[in-house]
Image (cartoon, rainbow, N blue to C red):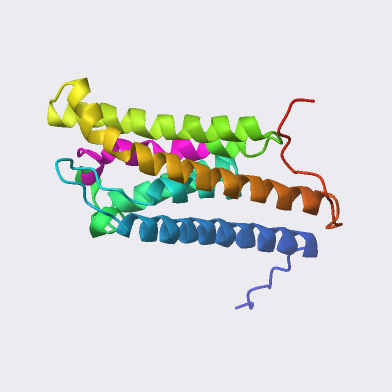
Amino acid sequence: MAAPQRLDLPPWVVAREGQEIAKWFGRVGVVLAVTAVVTVSAQLAVPIPGTPVPVTLQDLAVLAVGMLLGPVRGGVAIASYLVIGAMGAPVFANGNGGLPWLMGPTGGYLLAFPLAAFVIGHASRRERLWILVLGVVAAQFVVFTCGVGQLTWVTGSNLRVAIDLGLVPFLPGMALKSVLITIFGAALAAHRRGEAQGGAPHHENAIETRGR
């Protein structure tokens, strides 16, 4: 019986396969890192009397992820976080997990996170401050619109009550977090501008505060 012959692949095939494997592990690593960051931010939850929606740092983490990874990768990474949570992993607020949590009164906020990351990811790639600010406002609008909408549906309350429960108590915190994430986005844009210029020192703002 003849011995099996060894199959030698061309070096370029081996190199390409190695690159694909490295990319796959890189994507998995990004998803795990994002899941860890957003999970930690979800555990920093402060309950508010009279409303089922707690104050967390999730929206801040989600917007930061969108800025860092961009619209597509950021949105996909956050969507992967939701899938992991829907499968039962305790990654949501107060260690909760499972599909019923996404269908509950706070699920609308969570389900809006991928779109919010996508929106801010696009805005953060522009080089004007007003676009970044508009992107932050739009992303927060997406989160709270979806959140209040599902809160209305799940609780059976009218829209006015849902707004009082799911939006009004969070306005001060939302304003503060919007300022913080805008500062982060401006600093990130400045860093990217420096890298684009070959790391040379520069004295111009990365984000223009006025139109050209």
Occupied quadrant, residue 93: bottom left
- Residue at position x 71%, y 39% in the image: 207
Residue at x-position 23% and y-position 43%: 53
The picture places residue 28, in percent across and down from the top left corner, at: 51, 58
Q: Which residues are magenta?
A: 101-118
Residue nearest the viewer, comparing 155 with 207 = 207
Q: Residue 42: horizontal and vertical position, in percent? A: 34, 55
Instruction: Please say if 197 is above or below 149.
Output: below
Residue 200: x and y in percent read 87, 57
Indicate whether residue 183 is drawn in magenta. Answer: no
* One can see residue 69 in this view: no
Coordinates of residue 145 in the picture (x, y in percent): 35, 28
Residue plotted at (58% across, 50% down)? 184
- Above or below residue 199? Residue 132 is above
120 vs 71, nearest the viewer:
120
Which quadrant holds the C terminus? top right
